[in-house]
Image: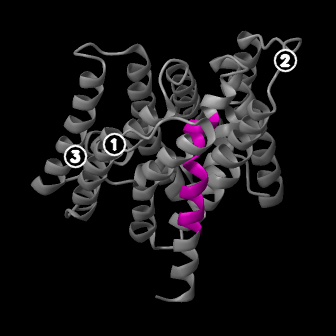
Amino acid sequence: MNNLMWRSLAGGIVSVVAFSLTAPATKLAVASFSPFAVTGMRGLIAGVFCLAYLAWNRGPIPDYKTLGSLFLVGAVGAVGFSVLLALGLQTVPATHASVFLAMLPLLTAMMSQWILRESTSPLFWFGAVSGAAISMGFMIARSHGHLAVGDVYLFSAVLSAAWGYVRVAKYTRVMGGARTMSWLVVSCSPLFLSLLISGQPDWSQPISTESVVALLYLGTISQSLGMFLWCWSLSTGYAALVSQTQMIQPFLSLFAAAILLGEKLEPEIAWVVTAVMACVAISTWAKVRKPKVSYAADAAVLKRA
């Protein structure tokens, strides 16, 4: 492994370690703020760092059509994910979120097949369907045959994120990962502000230090700086290797919830996460051919970005 490969791998590991605190941090934040206020504040904090990056990068401003498309992707993939995650964590433990976040690579790949028309092998679908079935079975079993509201929110959050990842992929091919994510967050700033206002945070009530620290983490690391490092790691030409580091994220989230929130690390949850990540490994290593569609049209639209 050459020096760039080692640095790419190290960047991926650091990013995944940072992302693994997202669910526990959101759980801490909603203890003092509403889900809408949490989403608005973390988005606006991230927007400050994204604006700073764009000013430093000095790249051209994308055209209105591109900004509109990024706003739509951000509204669903970033804002939708954050709101649904916060709503879900109001009623269920952060350890539950680890089970659904373990499905994110699988659902992203399935969305890629559906939206980008990628041709995949039967082994890939074996892993994808098995992983989804295990996660859904766990969710239904824990709710005694009925879907718990919190779990439905978490599953919807993961679907939103997976859709956003796939839709934003064509822009990262042309604009680069960090610049795409920065414009996505900045374009959604009015939406983040409206969510903060509608969330009506009561500043007169006691606000825990843990909630404030959690919010700062969500805005500075989870939604901006950590994402910048992750995008850079994927853009070095070793995306397949770097993406493997995501397999440790659910386990780190479980331990983070146990340490930061004092949640009990139930054996069955650990086994479910292990089984789901085994399915992720099967799908990852399965042969996936390149998309059949051409991105020439997308590049033509974005060439001025």
Front label number (1 vs 2): 1
- Secondary structure mostly seen in magenta is helix
Using the rendered image of the protein, determine whether residue 266 is visible from the camera's viewpoint: yes
- Classify 173 as above or below 67: below
Residue 263 picture location, percent across and down:
52, 35
Residue span colored magenta = 11-25
Left or right: 45 with respect to 155? right
SS at mark 1 in the image: helix
Label 3 vs 1, first from the N-terminus: 3
Residue 25 picture location, percent across and down:
64, 37
Residue 106 picture location, percent across and down:
31, 46
Q: Which mark is residue 128?
A: 3
- Classify 143 as above or below 122: above
Label 2 vs 3, first from the N-terminus: 3
Q: Amino acid at mark 3?
A: Ala
Left or right: 209 with respect to 76? right
Q: Which mark is residue 206?
A: 2
Label 3 CA crowd tier, 10 Å (few <14, some 14–19, many 20+): many
Q: Residue at x 57, y 87 (%)?
A: 3
Q: Amino acid at mark 1?
A: Pro
